[in-house]
């Protein structure tokens, strides 16, 4: 992350943080660093600008994890309608079998089973797409914030070079009325 603060002429303390990718080399390290930044911003800023311009995207799990740090109330995440093809069925079936074979927690197994069944239902009905499913491990389209989430006003900078998860994050912010987006589509 690249971050800093600025005191505006009206005395407001504005924080800035650049998120260059939604696929960091170490998710755990990145989230630990982000938690430290947010603790500082909560204590030392009146508003925050989050820059995801020219961000190529990355991991859905990371996008949802950073969203949990910028939205201080339970919020809705993005559901995915999966193309009902044999390849997707095989992918979900393999993930489910792997979870069962490795003793994954019951809620993860249930989520994978629900996703598989949603795609199978769409495939069997020749609908083309499944209903919206969650691709996170909880299976929920509603997520809870983490302790210490940023509570002050914020805005997100976007541009036409943001893609994938860098589109998903601003969509979550906008859909949950957390703050405005500024920039190019």
Image (cartoon, helix red, strand yellow):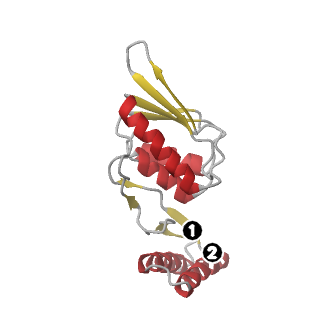
Residue 37 versus residue 107 in the image, above or below: above
Q: In this view, does 47 lie to the left or right of 17?
A: left
Quadrant occupied by the N terminus:
top right
- Residue 58 in percent (x, y) is at 62, 54
Mark 1 neighbour density, 10 Å: few (under 14) some (14–19) many (20 or more)? some
Q: Do the residues labelled 2 and 1 touch (CB within 8 Å)?
A: yes
Kindly tell me whether residue 180 is visible in this rendering. Answer: no
- Residue to which mark 2 is pinned: 88
What is the residue that sits farthest to the left in this orientation?
73
* Near-viewer residue (16 or 120): 16
Image point (48%, 61%), residue name: 79
| Quarter of the view holding residue 95 | bottom right
Q: Earlier in the sequence, mark 2 or mark 1?
A: 1
Q: At numbered mark 1, what does the secondary structure look like: helix, strand or loop? A: strand
Which residue bears the numbered disc 1?
A: 82
Rendering quarter of residue 126: bottom right
- Please state the horizontal and vertical placement of residue 88, each as a whole percent of the image: 63, 75
Residue 145 seen in render: yes
Q: In x, y percent, where is residue 72?
A: 34, 47
- Characterize the local packing of mark 2: few (<14), some (14-19) or many (20 or more) Cα atoms within 10 angstroms: some
**How far from the left and from the top, in percent, is residue 112?**
50, 77
């Amino acid at each position: 992350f690249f971050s800093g603060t600025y005191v505006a002429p009206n005395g407001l303390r504005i924080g800035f943080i650049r998120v260059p990718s939604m696929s960091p080399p170490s998710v755990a390290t990145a989230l630990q660093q982000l938690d430290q930044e947010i603790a500082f911003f909560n204590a030392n800023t009146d508003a925050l600008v989050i820059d995801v311009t020219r961000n190529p995207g990355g991991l859905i799990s990371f996008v949802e994890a950073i969203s949990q740090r910028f939205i201080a109330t339970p919020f809705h995440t993005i559901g995915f309608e999966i193309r009902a093809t044999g390849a997707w069925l095989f992918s979900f079936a393999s993930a489910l079998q792997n979870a069962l074979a490795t003793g994954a927690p019951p809620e993860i197994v249930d989520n994978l089973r629900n996703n598989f069944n949603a795609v199978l239902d769409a495939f069997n009905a020749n609908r083309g797409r499944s209903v919206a499913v969650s691709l996170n491990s909880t299976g929920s389209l509603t997520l809870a914030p983490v302790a210490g989430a940023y509570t002050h006003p914020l805005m997100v900078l976007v541009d036409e070079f943001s893609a994938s998860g860098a589109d998903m994050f601003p969509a979550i912010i906008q859909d949950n009325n957390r703050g405005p987006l500024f920039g190019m589509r």
